[in-house]
Amino acid sequence: MTFRRAGGANGGKQGDGAASASVPSPVPDGGKRVIRRLIADFSLRLIVAGILLVVLAVLILYWMQLKLLDLDAGRSFAQAGMLKLIDTMEVDESGTPHFDEELLDLVRSEGGWVQMLDDQGRAAYSVYTPEDVPTAYKPGEFVAYWKKKEPFPYDLAVWIRQRGGVTYTLLYGVIPEEKRLLQMVMETAGAPGPGLTLPPGLEDRLKEADAAVQLLDPSGRQVASFGSAGKVLAEYSLQELALRSVYGNRYDLKLASHYDSRTQYTWVVTIPFHEKGVLAGVLKNEIGVMLVALAGLLLTTLLLFLLLSLWYANRFGGPVLHMIDWLQQLGRGQFREPHGHRGPRSLDRKGRLQRRYRLFVDVFLSLRRLTGILSRNEEMRAKLEQTREEWITGVSHDLKTPLTSIKGYSHMLEAPKYGWSADEIREFAGVIREKAEYMELLIDDLSLTYRLQNEALPLELRETELNDLTEIVIRRFRTNPRFADARIVFKPASSPLFSQIDERWLSRAIENLLANAVLHNPAGTDVEVSVAGNGEAESFVRLEIRDNGGGMDEETVGRLFERYYRGTNTEGGSDGTGLGMAIARQIVLAHHGNIRVGSELGRGTVVTIWLRQASPPVEAMQEDQV
């Protein structure tokens, strides 16, 4: 079965856009999934960044502690260097200790020596030990030397620690440089007084150590000095001299003094702390170390957040910019994803979404669906423009043909040289009336299809029994002389089926479908009309019109409901307006129903309508029970 002309409000295959016969399942909310992924991803990255910051802070604090120990060791090996020395000590299987070579070099540079004593006070290990240092100590002797109760030329520092069940006693001795220089000054300078004379060899030694020698009067005022005048005070108070003697590290210097009770003069030798290696510059004191550590923490934090920002910009900014480019391209009418050298930028070589785009997988799926829909709509629009032009041409022809007949017969009636009989005049008038009615029907159908398309046709819905309505429509359809020979069989449902419908317009839709089934099939085609429920689980009524005619090809079925589509078969003449299928479909849609067409060439056509079933009224139920 082929149609001479058919139309519909929307394109698509087999009634696309019609109301579904079942309630569609809800679409998953992709936006919420994207938000949850963003929250999880941002939270994870911030947690990782926080952990890295904590690790960096711990490492910087550890570095600061090491540098402070290095600083203390450089100022006074006895305070901090010995702690590091015993911490780094390793004992081999024979019991011989081994120490860090850098720390031993620092011991040598300080002019010190190291001994390790066993439980009997014997020196089991010695390094840089002078000849005047004992190799064994009695308990009382050792304590006397340590507490300065017995003369001993060296300052002693003692560390006692257990490791692996063995007690280790580490002894560090040194004559500080400032004390050694002070002793040399007192031995060579003579009695203290306003004049200060030093031998050339001692001057060279003082210059080499960058030391300053001062002679203070009883009030603490400087009366004579040598070297580094800018690094020492010209006058000392009791507090200043005491603090510099005990807490020299606060002033970045080492100070040794000797008070001559006979003359009441005081010798003062001052040596600044020498900056060595990594302790140079800003790391020469505790404040410098802490400032460097704080600056390092701030810089590493800024660097971490800068890298994190760049990473986020690449991970989130890239896909967002790609989506913006995609939308702008859609706005320019280019219905495809922006491409790179290897095709779509969001896909890898295997056609899978790249890693940095997977966070927005729902957005990209939506964009691809949108792109596909817009592309199909553009193709459909182009087809509609073409078919509309064809349809307008066809409508113009359909209007022009009856107008030509009306105009021709009018001229014939008007011609004065002819004298027409009454029967001829009635025949001419009948043709004119028939053509005028055809034109009126065509205009009415055009108006109706646009009113249906724009939902401007009010429906008077009432609960109606569809078996009775369909039977009445078929009976009325057969009374038309044009369809008197139609072979139509009606199969009603086994029980009453009710639906909320407008009887007038639904009848019009059924009549249009029957007319197309009869007019556009060979004579003798059987048409079967059936009404049935759609099962207890579904609240729909199914009305089916089936014929065994010639059928339609796939393209005709796919475009059957396009408003401007014009069929290729014109063998049926100009019967009808060509808008029957469009009007039937729009009427069904106005009832919130659905209409589908299935057809194959040589196997006939099936048109199926679904309408929502309504509960039958009480009176009908009582009659059915009776």
Image (cartoon, rainbow, N blue to C red):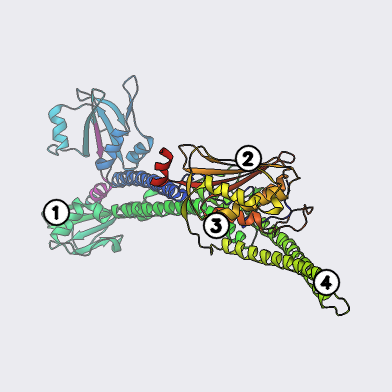
Is label 2 in a helix, a strand or a loop?
A: loop
- The residue under the point 30% across, 60% down is 227
Residue 151 or 512: which is nearer the viewer? 512
Q: Is residue 137 visible?
A: yes
Q: Is residue 176 magenta?
A: yes
Q: In this view, does 385 lie to the left or right of 469?
A: right
The spot of residue 15 in percent (x, y) is 61, 49
Q: Residue furthest bottom?
A: 416
Considering only order in the chain, which callout, 2 or 4, is on the residue closer to the N terminus?
A: 2
Q: Which of label 2 and label 3 is nearer to you?
A: 3
Nearest the viewer among 327 and 370 is: 370
Category of crowding for the residue at label 3, using alpha-carbon neighbours closer than 10 angstroms: few (below 14), some (14–19), many (at least 20): few
Numbered mark located on residue 260 in the image? 1
In this rendering, the label closer to the viewer, 4 or 2: 4
Q: In which quarter of the image is residue 70?
A: top left
> Badges 4 and 1: C-beta atoms under 8 Å apart?
no
> Is 245 left or right of 385, judged from the image as shown?
left
Left or right of 612 in this view: 228: left
Which amino acid type corresponds to the residue marked 1 in the rendered image?
Asp
Residue 555, horizontal then vertical, whole percent: 71, 48
- For disc 2, the marked residue is 350
Q: Which of marks 1 and 3 is nearer the N terminus?
A: 1
Q: Give the range drawn in magenta.
A: 170-185
Q: Distance between the residues labelled 4 and 3?
A: 42 Å
CA separation, marks 2 and 3? 58 Å
Report the residue at 51% width, 54% height from top. Answer: 591
